[in-house]
Amino acid sequence: MMAKGLNKVAPKTLNFNWSKKIGFETVSPRWQSLDYQICVDAVKAMADSEGYFPAWDGMLKKRFDKPISPKIPITIIFGDTDHTLPAKTCQERSLAPSHAKWIILPETGHAPMWDSTNEVLAEILETAKLAR
C-alpha cells in the first residue's frame, strides 16, 4: 500500500513544500501552513493503522440509519473546500438527525481541526456542555 511506503520517506520529504503539496493540497486549502509534525503524524496514522481503510470504507457506506435521541447533542462540521466528502455528493443534511447542528466552516478542508482549530474546539466544548 502506498501509505506504508510513504511512512518511511515522509519524515524526510515533508520538509519540502512540493511534498506537502502532493500529500495535503486536496485535504486542506491551508496545506502550506500545516505543521510539519501534523503531516508526518497523519501519514504515519494511515500507514500504521490496520483499521483505517476498513473504517473509511464503512463510513462511506454507513449513514444515520437508526433514530438518535434528541437528548444526545450532535454537531456535524464540514469544511467548505472538503474534496474528500464534497457538498454535492456527500453532505446530505436531510439524512442527519433533525436536532443536529450543521456547520460549514470557511476556508476549511476535510480536516477542520487542522484548518479551523479554534472554531472546532469551540464547537466541541459547546456540544459537550449540552451533553451534561
Image (cartoon, grey):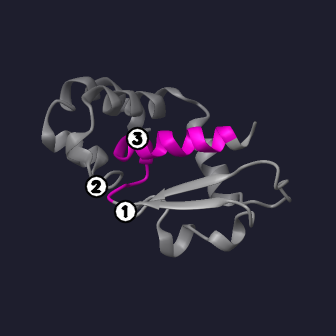
Instruction: From the image, state whether disc 3 or disc 2 is nearer to you.
Output: 3
In this rendering, position of residue 75 left or right of residue 83: right
Task: List the residue tagged with mark 2.
Answer: 29
Q: In this view, does 61 lie to the left or right of 53?
A: right
Is residue 47 depicted above or below 90 in this figure? above
Residue occupying the point 75% across, 60% down = 64
Give me the residue at 40% from left, 36% from top.
3
Q: Is residue 18 left or right of residue 72?
A: left
Looking at the picture, how far across and down is residue 81, in whole percent?
37, 62
| Position in image of residue 9 (x %, y %) | 26, 27
Q: How far, Cα to Cα, is label 3 from label 2?
A: 16 Å
Q: Which of marks 1 and 2 is nearer the N terminus?
A: 2
Q: Residue 118 carries which label?
A: 3
Q: In this view, does 2 lie above or below 47?
A: below
Left/right placement of residue 88 relative to residue 30 reads right
**Magenta range:** 107-129
Q: Which mark is residue 81?
A: 1
Q: Which of 4 and 91 is in front in this view?
A: 91
Across and down, in percent, residue 18 comes to 14, 44
Q: Determine whether label 1 and label 2 are within 8 Å by CB.
A: yes
Q: Is residue 122 magenta?
A: yes
User: For the stretch drawn in magenta, what is the main secondary structure?
Assistant: helix
- Amino acid beneath label 2: Pro
